[in-house]
Image (cartoon, rainbow, N blue to C red):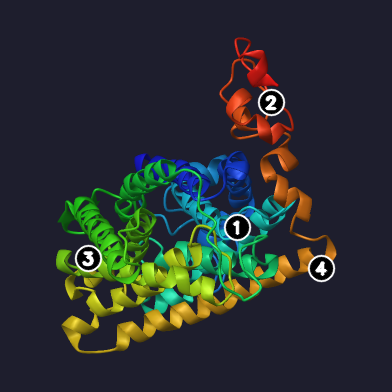
Amino acid sequence: MVAAVLVMFMQAGFAFLEAGLTRMKNAAHIAGKNVLIFGICSIVYWAVGFALAFGDGNGVIGMHGFFPSVGAMLAVGKAPFTFFTSIPGAGAYLFEVVFAGVSLAIVWGAMAERAKLWVYFAFGVCFTLIYSVTSHWIWHAGGWLFGLGMQDFAGSTVVHYQGALAALAGAILLGPRIGKFGQDGRANPIPGHNMPYAVLGTIILWFGWFGFNPGSTLAVVTGRHLGYFGYVALTTNLAAAAGALGGIGTAWLVLRKPDVSMMLNGVIAALVAITAASGFVAPWAAVVIGFFAAAIAVVAVPLVERIGIDDPIGAVAVHGLAGVWGTLATGIFAVPTLAENLATGRGGLVYTGSFHQVGVQALGLVAVGAFTFTASFTCLWTMKRLWGIRVEEHVETAGLDVSEHGMWGYPEFYIPVPGGYGTESHGHLLGHVHRHPAAPAADAA
């Protein structure tokens, strides 16, 4: 339960990170949607998603436990959620729904600043169901990828890769923001408005990840290992630390500047990558995984722009490509004894000399990728054809805060507030100027 609350707090991290990396005129909209989507996800996942993901069923989908009530939520190890043998259904639901919420939060990063508000409601429902199906494949003991031995300890594939694929589908269908690309096709920088917000968001996410990965042990004592919870926290932290260094170091080499935003991307990419591997790898491997994940993200963020995709917070690179690397890296570095303890898959290439586990990981990526991208693209394409998913040009130009919500995230910069900061220094934005009563008449003229 404590781990679940930590993961839920990651929504605050996403709110700060995404608001900080986008423009001031959209700050309230971008931050506020994290509350909205978690509300949508929580209800849909309770009603349908939890049963699809962890209800008793077959290798493809859960078929029991829809709209669970008192009996199912209080029972331990009984139908319809026999998978959870040590915790009650209610605890299992809460821990799993916060993961679904994180995956959904990733989606909107690449769609920021131009998607209509109603799309959050509609696609929030669709994606929660898509997420639940693949969760069953990999995390339920009866799932077909679990049966093949796919290793994804806490969701590099299930949570991050899936979220990034849906984000990619949305970014493609929405198209770039106004002014993002010039007539020559070159990307124009659209900097975020508040880097300290982005830093704070990253630190909150790093903090919340200690619920994300260690909490996936579902117990402080796992098998014969006392302290395994702490071990997973160790590998998680080492990877994130290596990601910070890898991110700023790679930016220094590639971009010729130690870009702070790339350092933040490095931390998050490293955390994404170690999410699959945290319960399977040695500490030294966690450092390697985190460092290379950061390097991949720093190089991939501008590459995504070069192919014409506008991703304001780098979700496709940071969560998508780092998720791919983390999933494959687990198959490379998994320690045989840890795989045996978890009864999931085999030791990795480094220890066994066999590509078997890498092959299983790759198969999982292909299957999840094909299903998630196709389903997400189809849902969003249908919405686009029927109703349109992008705001009108004048709405985007004015900003989603005032256009969609009738308010500003920073009102003093845009409207006159008595005694407020914006009444003088930003009066030109209002079409008139507020003068201080003591200003000389000549100066006023």
Q: The residue tagged with tag 3: helix, strand or loop?
A: helix
Picture coordinates of residue 83 (x, y %)? 43, 59
The residue that disc 1 covers is 128
Report the amino acid beneath label 1.
Thr
CA–CA distance between discs 2 and 3? Answer: 57 Å
The residue that disc 3 covers is 286
Picture coordinates of residue 335 (x, y %)? 19, 73
Q: Are marks 3 and 4 in contact (CB under 8 Å)?
A: no
Report the amino acid beneath label 4.
Arg
Residue 217 left/right relative to 429:
left
Callout 1 crowding tier (Cα within 10 Å): few <14, some 14–19, many ≥20: many
CA–CA distance between discs 3 and 4? Answer: 45 Å
Q: Residue furthest right?
A: 386
Report the amino acid beneath label 2.
Val
Numbered badge on residue 385: 4
Q: Residue furthest top?
A: 438
Picture coordinates of residue 387 (x, y %)? 83, 60
Q: Nearer the viewer, residue 291 or 34?
A: 291
CA–CA distance between discs 4 and 2? Answer: 44 Å
The numbered mark, 2 or 3, whose residue comes first in the sequence reads 3
Q: With respect to residue 335, does 427 lie above or below?
A: above
The numbered mark, 4 or 1, whose residue comes first in the sequence reads 1
